Image (cartoon, grey):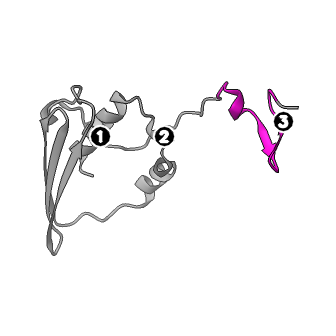
Amino acid sequence: MLPYMDYVQNAFYEATEWNQDNSYATLTATARALLDFPTPRGLRMNLSSLSSLNFATSYGLGNFGVVDGSVSYLSSSLPLSNVQKSCNVDLHAVTQGYRQLQELQRSEDPRYLEIWQGGARIDGRSGR
């Protein structure tokens, strides 16, 4: 996705209090960012806008030996009133570099503390 579209999507995550570390795709994101990168060559141009509080568009045009392009649309069920104009956005908010993952919180819900084997509870706070 294009950087401004990532920024808008992150605003949605903030509005819904979603923790991105809960996604399976983020488990290898840091390693991919460090090891899997393309060699820059050619030209790429991206234009993005937040046309309303619930809808954003982005257009890309590139020339890497072959002219190509893309169109992206992002629609939100929540108004993204905390999204700023791209000229006012801090660069760190639109680029995802190395991230320090937080340690997982231990749940106090007894259902998550039980240990099951062969269909029977064998251990846990409320187990035998």
Which secondary structure lies at badge 2? helix
- Residue 125: say if magenta: yes
Which residue position holds label 2?
A: 21
Does residue 112 show up?
yes
The image shows residue 98 at horizontal and vertical percentages of 42, 43
Which secondary structure lies at badge 1? helix
Residue sitting at 44 percent across and 59 percent down? 35
Say which mark, if any, is on residue 123: 3
- The kind of residue on which mark 1 rests is Gln
Between residues 51 and 121, which one lies in front from this camera angle?
121
The image shows residue 11 at horizontal and vertical percentages of 29, 33
Q: Earlier in the sequence, mark 1 or mark 2?
A: 1
User: On the rendered image, what quadrant is the C terminus found in?
Assistant: top right
Say which mark, if any, is on residue 9: 1
Find the magenta span and give its range. 107-126
- The kind of residue on which mark 2 rests is Asp
Q: Residue furthest front?
A: 119
- Which one is closest to the eye, mark 3 or mark 1? 3
Residue sitting at 80 percent across and 27 percent down? 126
